[in-house]
Amino acid sequence: MFDESASAALQRIDEWEQSLTRRAEHARKLAERAAAISATARSEDDLIEVTVGAEGQIERLHLDERTRRQPAEDTARQILETLNAAKAKMIEQFDEAVSETVGADSETGRTLVAGLRRRLGQTGQ
């Protein structure tokens, strides 16, 4: 009887260890993918292009020369709209990476995606 319960306990420990190893590997893969994410968006009139990096920072901002012919207020609004579109694309990429690694329905996945949305100011989506 003792041999059976000891054997079952050892099997549970082995399964637990394998589960932890799998989770660690998934987390490592997610971290690698997340670090490489960037997204680019263009304004509807193609005058503005914004690229954001893995932390949502602006990596590139391109303003077409035609933006000089419009009010600065319009250009500023378009930059912000395009920046938000790029951030939304980045979140989509992160969602995909989470789904393919730790799982979108896992507590870890939901927490990570929610945290990124908060940091990027994209909570209403």
Image (tube, grey):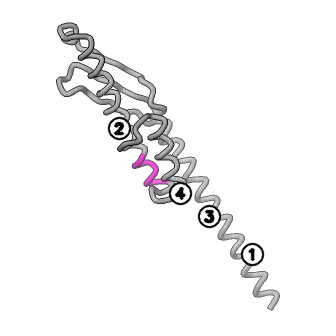
Disc on the earlier residue, 3 or 1: 1
Please name the residue that numbered disc 2 is placed on.
Answer: 88
Disc 4/disc 1 C-alpha distance (Å): 27 Å
What segment is highlighted magenta in the picture?
Answer: 95-101
Disc on the earlier residue, 3 or 4: 3
Viewer-proximal residue among 66 and 27: 66
Tell me the element at label 3: helix
Q: Amino acid at mark 3?
A: Ser
Disc on the earlier residue, 2 or 1: 1
Which residue appears at 35% of the width and 38% of the height? 88
Disc 3/disc 2 C-alpha distance (Å): 32 Å
Quarter occupied by residue 77:
top left
x, y percent for residue 106? 50, 59
Disc 3/disc 1 C-alpha distance (Å): 14 Å
Q: Amino acid at mark 1?
A: Leu
Disc 4/disc 2 C-alpha distance (Å): 21 Å
Please name the residue that numbered disc 1 is placed on.
Answer: 10
Q: Amino acid at mark 4?
A: Glu
In front: label 2 or label 1? 2
Q: Amino acid at mark 2?
A: Ala
x, y percent for residue 95? 41, 48
In the picture as drawn, the residue positioned furthest to the top comes out as 68
Tag 3 and tag 1, C-beta contact below 8 Å:
no
Please name the residue that numbered disc 4 is placed on.
Answer: 107
